[in-house]
Image (cartoon, rainbow, N blue to C red):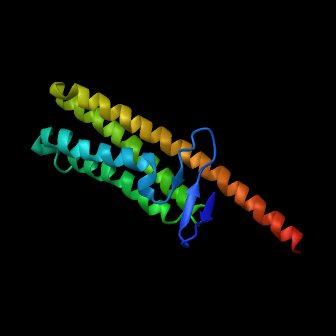
Amino acid sequence: MEERNATGGSEVRFVGREAKGVIKSYEDLEVYQNSYRAMLMVFREILPLLPKEERYDLVDQLRRSSKAIPRLIAEGYSKRHQLKGFQKYLDDAHAESNETIVSLKQAFDLYLLKDKIRVHDELIDLYDKISRQLFNLSGAWTRLAKQRRGSEMRFEERNA
């Protein structure tokens, strides 16, 4: 639910089992924080180990998909006032997360990055969590949008 605070800014509150407080910015979203941290790990721990011949394929794909996830979350958050705006960006971020998982598995399987097994497993687990978080946030946003539409329809009926 989006509310206006005393200073005129907007705050988003998700009420439910796992409510963790007020969301004032995309940076407050745990999924954003996780995706940003995972992107940094990919850049620091995985990309430097891949061979030069993968520069325009696997390296480029991992760069683009891992960077896209936090960007899409941030961009979508700015469109949260639109009923379907935020939803589209969450869906795209989810697709990029799954793409990143496949690319990480390919990097590991093709180039046997044995000294990075722990990092690889941590990244796969983290991107899996990110995908689940995006799926759950998308579902919560859909339910919120339906509640908003229902409220608007009831308001219009009362004032007709």
Task: Say which residue appears at 55% left-offset and 56% top-offset.
Answer: 87
Residue 34 in view: yes
Q: Quadrant of the N terminus?
A: bottom right
Q: Is residue 131 left or right of residue 16?
A: left
Q: Is residue 101 above or below residue 140?
A: above
Among the 4 quarters of the image, the one containing residue 58: top left
Task: Say which residue appears at 29% left-offset and 36% top-offset.
Answer: 104
Q: Nearer the viewer, residue 106 or 24?
A: 24
Q: Quadrant of the C terminus?
A: bottom right
Q: Nearer the viewer, residue 65 or 77?
A: 77
Q: How many marks?
A: 0
The x, y position of residue 118, in whole percent, is 24, 26
Task: Say which residue appears at 63% left-offset and 47% top-offset.
Answer: 15
Task: Say which residue appears at 54% left-offset and 49% top-offset.
Answer: 21
Among the 4 quarters of the image, the one containing residue 100: top left
Among the 4 quarters of the image, the one containing residue 124: top left
Residue 83 in view: no
Q: Is residue 140 left or right of residue 93?
A: right
The x, y position of residue 30, in whole percent, is 44, 46
Q: Is residue 88 left or right of residue 142?
A: left
The x, y position of residue 155, in whole percent, is 82, 67
Which residue sits furthest front?
6
